[in-house]
């Protein structure tokens, strides 16, 4: 007897428990590798603006995905911060993972929101080093943190400062002697 259940069209994947388990595992891997994550609500944005946002994320080395809220909750169920961020997973949710520079995603979002195209983009919250952040902390604190290159420059300046002072101290006696000769010449 022929089955009464219609066959699935070719190319259409039926959502199975195994597929969802795989997706949860992939999401969990992203959270394990990340230095920070920013949760976004993109409701009301045009396709063109979302494409621009994705391009900016790619330039900054940030991975951005639209995720199912239930899958993210399942992926993070055994983390210490899941309770603090579970309120972020309502409505449409996009996650921007930063793997090297913790402030990269937040900086891209902040710059994008200043543009007229980003008026519909809303930050829901974020995570950095296992600490949950609310929307204000993401936009104000995380986005204003110095980036990886800025921190490298600061570190280099710290390393160079002692040697610059040492060179200045070595040059001081010769410089003082030159000032003494110049003053003697001016005097007579």
Image (cartoon, helix red, strand yellow):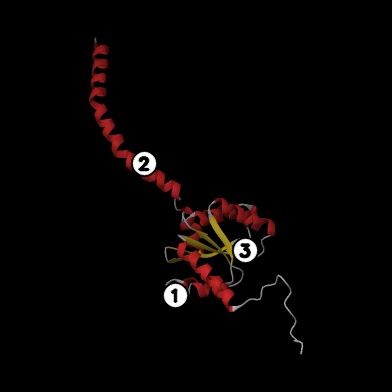
Secondary structure type for disc 2: helix
Secondary structure type for disc 3: loop
Which quadrant: the N terminus? bottom right
Q: Can residue 70 be seen in this view?
A: no
Residue 31 in percent (x, y) is at 48, 65
Which image quadrant is residue 67 in?
bottom right
Say whether disc 2 or disc 3 marks the residue closer to the N-terminus.
Answer: 3
The answer to the question of whether label 2 and label 1 lie on touching residues, with beta carbons closer than 8 A, is no
Indicate left or right for 130 with 124 as reference: left
Q: Is residue 65 visible?
A: yes
Q: Which mark is residue 42?
A: 3
Front-lying residue, 170 or 21: 21
Circle 2 packing at 10 Å, graded few (<14), some (14-19), many (20+), is few
Residue with the mark numbered 1: 78
Looking at the picture, does residue 10 appear above or below residue 112? Answer: below
Which image quadrant is residue 108 in?
bottom right
Indicate left or right for 124 with 13 as reference: left
Residue 85 in percent (x, y) is at 49, 71
Using the numbered discs, state the Cα–Cα distance from disc 1 to disc 3 in whole angstroms. Answer: 27 Å
Indicate left or right for 91 with 32 as reference: right
Looking at the picture, does residue 39 appear above or below residue 112? Answer: below
Residue with the mark numbered 2: 157
Residue pictured at 59% horizontal, 52% vertical: 56
Residue that lies at the very extreme toward the top in this rendered image: 188
Residue pictured at 44% horizontal, 50% vertical: 148
Front-lying residue, 124 or 156: 156
- Observer-side mark, 2 or 1, equals 1
Using the numbered discs, state the Cα–Cα distance from disc 2 to disc 3 in whole angstroms. Answer: 40 Å
Secondary structure type for disc 1: loop
Residue pictured at 23% horizontal, 20% vertical: 177
Which quadrant: the C terminus? top left
Residue 58 in percent (x, y) is at 57, 53
């Amino acid at each position: 007897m022929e089955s009464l259940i219609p066959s699935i069209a070719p190319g259409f994947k039926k959502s199975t428990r195994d597929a969802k388990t795989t997706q949860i595992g992939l999401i969990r891997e992203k959270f394990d590798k990340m230095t920070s994550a920013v949760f976004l609500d993109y409701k009301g944005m045009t396709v063109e603006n979302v494409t621009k946002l994705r391009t900016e994320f790619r330039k900054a080395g940030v991975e951005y995905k639209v995720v199912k809220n239930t899958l993210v909750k399942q992926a993070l169920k055994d983390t210490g911060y899941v309770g603090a961020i579970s309120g972020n997973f309502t409505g449409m949710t996009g996650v921007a993972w930063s793997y090297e520079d913790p402030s990269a995603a937040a900086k891209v979002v902040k710059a994008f929101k200043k543009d007229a195209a980003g008026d519909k983009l809303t930050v829901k919250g974020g995570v950095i080093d296992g600490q949950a952040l609310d929307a204000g902390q993401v936009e104000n604190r995380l986005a204003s943190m110095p980036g990886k290159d800025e921190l490298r420059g600061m570190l280099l300046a710290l390393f160079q400062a002692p040697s610059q002072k040492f060179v200045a101290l070595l040059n001081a006696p010769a410089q003082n002697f030159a000032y003494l000769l110049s003053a003697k010449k001016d005097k007579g």
